[in-house]
Amino acid sequence: MEMDLQIALDNYAYGIRDVIPQYITGKMKDREALEDELALVLRARDQIEPALEQWRVNEPNAAKLVDELDRVFLLSRDALIKIAPALSFYREGKQIPRARWWYYLDLITRVQVEEFVLPSAAWDETMVLPERIVVRQFALAKE
């Protein structure tokens, strides 16, 4: 694995496992720092995405780790929204595709224990995320 991708994976894991839980539990409270930390988590996930399919073949442990981290990220969304209500800030003025669901946590709603949906009257795409999760679907809607 390339060093830059390893760093991105380490940063993503650190943000999901350590930083976000500390804010959710109130151990860390600085809102400006939280915004910076979330930006780092989103950036790390952006860096990982292009390599993920190749990892499924060549780096299965890394791909499995990303799947598990994604799941934790999704499961922490409700608590994260309570402490960082302006998650739309990270996509304002940018053309971020809905496939990069990590930018749309504020719009995703849980419709079943294992299913998450970006709500809309007209769904234009459905994406099933990694097989590690039994069912993890997002309805990707037009803005």
Image (cartoon, helix red, strand yellow):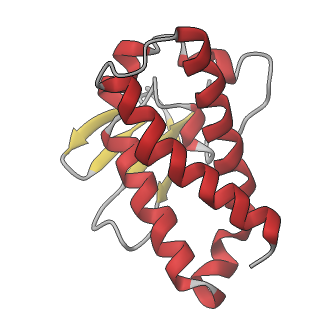
Quadrant, the C terminus = top right
Residue 20 x/y as whole percent: 44, 33
Report how many numbered discs are placed on residues in the image. Answer: 0
In the rendered structure, the answer to whether residue 114 lies left or right of residue 22 reads: left
Residue 114 seen: yes
Q: Residue at x 74, y 79 (%)?
A: 1
Q: Residue at x 55, y 20 (%)?
A: 34
Q: Residue at x 72, y 16 (%)?
A: 92
Residue 136 x/y as whole percent: 35, 56
Q: Residue furthest left?
A: 113
Residue 79 x/y as whole percent: 30, 24
In the rendered structure, the answer to whether residue 102 lies left or right of residue 132 reads: right
The relative height of residue 123 versus residue 7 in the rendered view (above or below) is above
The answer to which quarter of the image holds residue 33 is: top right
Observer-nearest of 27 and 40: 27
Residue 125 seen: no
